[in-house]
Image: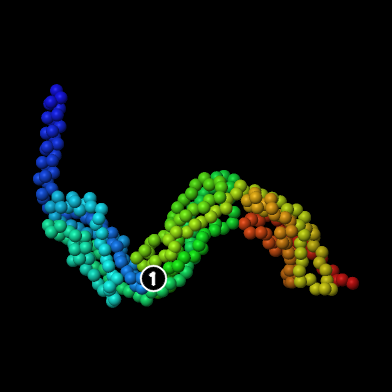
Amino acid sequence: MRKQIFLIIYSVVFAVFLWLSVSLNFLYNINLKIPLDVKLRDNQALADELPADIEVVLRGRGWDLLGMWFSKDLNYILDLSSVKRNLKLSIQTTVGEKINLPSDVSVVAAYPDTLNIDFDNISTKYVRIKNIVAVSLKEGYEIVGIPKTTPDSVKITGASSVLSKIKFISTEKKEFKSINSNLTVDINLSDSMSNLVKIEPRTVKIFYKIELAAEKKFEDLNVTIYNVPQNKEVLLIPPNLTLSLRGGVDLLTKISPSELKISIDFDMIEKDTLGSVTPNIEIPENLTLINFTPQKFQYIIKRKN
């Protein structure tokens, strides 16, 4: 019984091998995507972006194409370091040499079939970083202040015509979930223009200060009226203000009423036609003003004796 099973398996394997041997001797077409690796001198800059890959249609015997299909070394290296003028490069006629095609394999088509390579004056400038990292917190927590990015700007080098259009460089998209403590992340910058622009450094550090969220009420705060003429005084109705702030619990516990600045400009009172004015409220950074009362103050202007 075992001998019969062995013979059956051997027959199937032999039949498959025979079929492959015959089939792979026929001619086939395959599509391959080949990375484009551009080499430039330090003082060269491209005015237009080149594709990251080149798609080619190859024709040849199955055995030859099979080896290319599984090859990890296919790479179209475009060395422009010795080129001094704009040029038009035919991909279809040069790709065979660049990727060392077997003699029995031919290039049927290439996309794009031609590359227009234009150079421009090289320049350098610094641009800010746009943080597009997404951070979601556990319930009851909040990010205190603006996340700190180090460095907050990067040096970019490339063609003057390209750099003039760049206002910022974005980070890569990344998401962090259910965070309930301070978070520091090392994040790469987007390389969407790697053929055109050199970015230094390629990685930045972003710090998120995260605290348990809380609210705190401050009552009977004094209101300062400034620019009052020496011969006048102003009485407010009511005389004080109450407000509520939201922020990290550690920060809120350290805030004193003296750090909350509530004021009214006398010039606003003189120009008022409704009998009440809205105060200006200044609070420390990284806090949010939830509400305050009263929303408006009535006033009485008295002349000093």
- Where in the figure is residue 56, as x and y percent of width and height? 22, 59
145 lies above or below 44? above
> Does residue 291 appear in this view?
yes
* Residue at position x 78%, y 58% in the image: 240
- Where in the figure is residue 282, as x and y percent of width and height? 68, 62
* Residue at position x 15%, y 59% in the image: 106
Give, as a three-letter code, the residue at label 1.
Gly
Front-lying residue, 128 or 57: 128
Which of the 4 quarters of the picture holds residue 98?
bottom left
> Does residue 47 appear in this view?
no
Front-lying residue, 233 or 166: 166
Rendered-image quadrant of the N terminus: top left
At label 1, counting other C-alpha atoms closer than 10 Å, the crowd grade (few under 14, some 14-19, many 20 or more) is many
Label 1: which secondary element: strand
* Residue at position x 77%, y 66% in the image: 225
Which of the 4 quarters of the picture holds residue 80?
bottom left
- Where in the figure is residue 68, as x and y percent of width and height? 20, 53
Front-lying residue, 288 or 272: 288
- Where in the figure is residue 292, as x and y percent of width and height? 70, 56
136 lies above or below 107? above
Identify residue for label 1.
158
* Residue at position x 76%, y 69% in the image: 226
* Residue found at the very far right of the displayed protein: 305
Q: Is residue 252 left or right of residue 193?
A: right
203 lies above or below 301? above
